[in-house]
Image: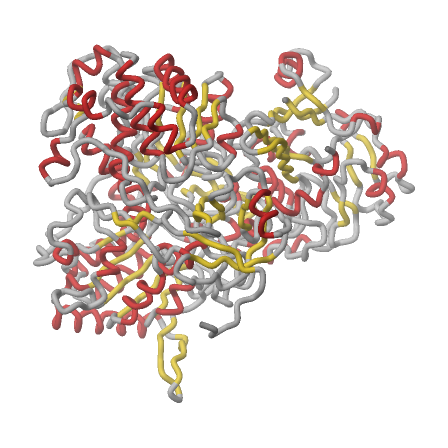
Amino acid sequence: MRYAMAIDTKKCVGCSDCVVACQTENNVPIGYCRDWVIEATTGTYPDLSLEFRSERCNHCSNAPCVRCCPTEASHVVNGGIVLVDHNECIGCKACIESCPYDARFVHPEGYVDKCTFCIHRVEKGENPACVNVCPTKCMYFGDTDDSNSEISKILKKRKWKTLIPEAGTDPNIYYLI
Amino acid sequence: MDKDFSRREFIKISSAGLGGLALSNPVFNWLKGETMVPGVLPGTYKRVPTYCEVCFWKCAGWAHVNDQGEIWKLTGNHEDPHCNGRLCPRGTGGVGMYYDEDRLKTPLIRRIVNGKQVYREASWNEAFDYIADKMKKIADEHGPECIALFSHGSGGKHFGRMLKAFGSPNITAPSYAQCRGPREVAFFSTYGEGIGSPERVDIRDTDCLVLIGSHIGENMHNGQVQEMSDAIDKGATIITVDPRFSTAASKSKHWLPIKPATDMALLLSWINVIINNEWYDKKYVEKYTFGFDELKEHVKNFTPEWAYGITTIKPHIIRKTAKVMANAAPSVIIHPGRHVTWYGDDTQRLRAVAILNALLGSWGRRGGFYNPEKRNVAKLKLPKYPKPSKTWRDAFPEQYKLAHLALASGICDATIPTAERDCSFKGWIVNGTNLISTLPKPANTLKAIQSLDLMVVVDTMPMEITGYADVVLPECTYLERYDNIRVSAHREPTIALRAPAVAPMYNSKPAWWMAKELANRLNLQDYFPFATEEEELDWQLKQVGSSLDEMKKIGMKKFDREFDDVYPLENLDDYEFNTNTGKIELYSTAMEDEGYDPLPTYTPHEEPPEGFYRLNYGRAPMHTFSRTANNPNLTDLMDENSVWINPKVAKEWDLANGQKIWLENQDGIVTSFPIKVRVTERIRWDSVYMVHGFGHTDKRMKRAYGKGASDSELITQTKIDPVMGGTGMRVNFVTFLTEAPIKGAV
């Protein structure tokens, strides 16, 4: 089983609902976030294109944060979800340095925090809060090892990219383009 | 490319940086010290139904509350067609409205202490007695009609009932003359029916969606944003007309970067092309419409070549996009927009939109405009309201004759006494609308306020308007109160319940209770026959076969349609329209009868003077007007606005991205605060753009104070729509000041 997310940049309007839904769902303190939205404009008026991307931890299959963690606080659980055990984390920030996606931050309580793919929801068979709330339904979550899952089908059908593939982390967030 | 994808860019748009202040919701402090095991949150949770009050879309949802009465999160109701289980960012962040520590907390009465005006905290009894005495005095001296209610939101229904019982029909919302009024009048004149809210556009099933200055996706009108996404999935063609590369423009196959203020020319030339090429729906036009020959004659000179000189849109693009629409017809929507008070000829521009839709046969057809149906809850059995002897209209003889609702700007103007008029308004009750930034010409609004004998402001937040009140009444948020049943017209009729998720915080109270208490003091208690709103709602719900108990469980109830006519004109069935001729009036007899142009014409609008740029304004998806400006969850996403400036213009003025500047308009008015420059290719060189609702001047709103600049301050000119009194507001021009203006300098 390999959990992954595919996000359709053709539909995303950059509204940041994913950010606020994550914040309330996971009690992320105000001033911090586990996901965020990027806007990238290219071209010259009036020949322009615009891409919005909802970004977060890529739950990499080859996760540098897990490898560099001295206390094994950063670890991988079933389905490839990368988590941080808050009790084990000593706040050394090595993982923050190692992450090419800048997806981690130090929670005001001292431990490193980041996206959990809403594992508490996924375990109950629900989608992560961001996927669940998105008004444009531009986010798909599921098991890419299951060729019949919606996400596997959409990744077969559509063109996609991942972020910073050259970092060799084997990320699991896909952007449909 | 990668540098564009840094977290820094994120801070700019979502503004929730890692360097930010940890401002945990106070309620969740109990979490501190406990291990955050994902998925295990202390307490047992229940869900309480509500419908959202952060904007007018009123999505039905659930407040998730624990046994200690603390709100965890808000989610959408899956059955609700307004949101389909997905709240927008504002709805999701609505919880911040409740937790905002800057809320109004107790009633305040203006008093003079040692020669200085101050607010004194008052009891509810003192506040109501004060208001009732003043209302009676105004009624005795000038008549009860001289008290007006301005409202935007659910509370208006309750105060409206009280005021109608008192004898005043002057109940208004800025959502008419400052927003969608021209659209309603234009469609009434053409089809005998308005557009309503949520808009009756069948975006879900359309093949072609045409947006004219309508920035769906930035305006987060939830169901509509969702349906636009569905339409993209289904391969619909989107055509966007906008001087700005809006989010919607970026999703469009055809973006027409029009010169601002020239939309009418484009619309007329589209009509010209569609008629001349016989691309219109002949059977539909013949069967349902009136005045086709007059229209054909009228538009014969409005060729794409003519329009090119005005709009800067090339003739072949005009022809091509007209063909795209015609090919999709009748599954095509020329979207009527929502905020359409732009240039003062807005009813006529929306008439052109209505006509174009009629030529393509989209009204009453799948993928065009559907026929909404609603199920009213039972009317309360109340005594008859007294018949008023005068209305706001008396201040405007022979003007705005097709206005079918009261004008907020009109009542404001009619509050400033003149020699000719003896019926100036003397009292205002203002609920949920910050008139200082809602109405154009703020100096005029302040002048009107100075003429009042009584001003009551009911709000949840210390908005600027509260600073001018004689009495401030703290309303509890929508999460702490019952309100009227939401009755909405949609493809299927629905009703929704708002129940309090938690008890009102501080000394705040629901509007229903305030209106009833005031009614008691005005001897109008018969108009509030129920002891509690729960009893009133339960009675109403039982009349439609539901109950308060049932609604508390389901939140929202769908009814079957009584008539199977979602698309009544799909098969060219007979249909009588509610117009003078019983037809779709391409040529409007209603307009003609009142002395207005029966067919829309192009009028050139004033252009910016040298060194000035047209001020365009709009929405960001995470904010609603100024209502959300201090919401901790939403300011976390966006805490200030910026002024969008084309790189060529920025170069000419030597402006850098992120630089703070002041904006000065054509009348020498300068913004109270500086605003950050956003140098972007997404805007034309002849206009600038900013998001409305920022630049708050009230220090009591700590997160909003001084953040960004207010477009409203710069809207000192309007062009009034002669048909219905709408205030065209995109007629202001600004220039840039790179140094702080010296206070008091001439």
- Left or right of A95 on screen, residue B467: left
Q: Is residue B67 visible?
A: no
Quadrant into which the C terminus of chain B falls: bottom left
Q: In the displayed image of the protein, which residue is found farthest to the right?
A: A70
**Residue at 44% from the left image edge and 46% from the top image edge:** B616
Q: Establish if B121 lies above or below B310.
A: below
Quadrant into which the N terminus of chain B falls: top right
Q: Is residue B102 visible?
A: yes
- Image location (x, y in percent) of residue B377: 24, 38
- Image location (x, y in percent) of residue B142: 13, 69
**Residue at 12% from the left image edge and 72% from the top image edge:** B141
**Residue at 23% from the left image edge and 48% from the top image edge:** B725
Q: Establish if B30 lies above or below B143.
A: above
Q: Establish if B636 lies above or below B604.
A: below
Count the numbered circles shown: 0
Q: Quadrant of residue B125?
A: bottom left
The front one of A91 and B421 is B421
Q: In the displayed image of the protein, which residue is found farthest to the bottom?
A: B114
- Image location (x, y in percent) of residue B471: 33, 70
Which colour style is shown?
secondary structure
The front one of B448 and B635 is B448
The front one of B617 and B431 is B617
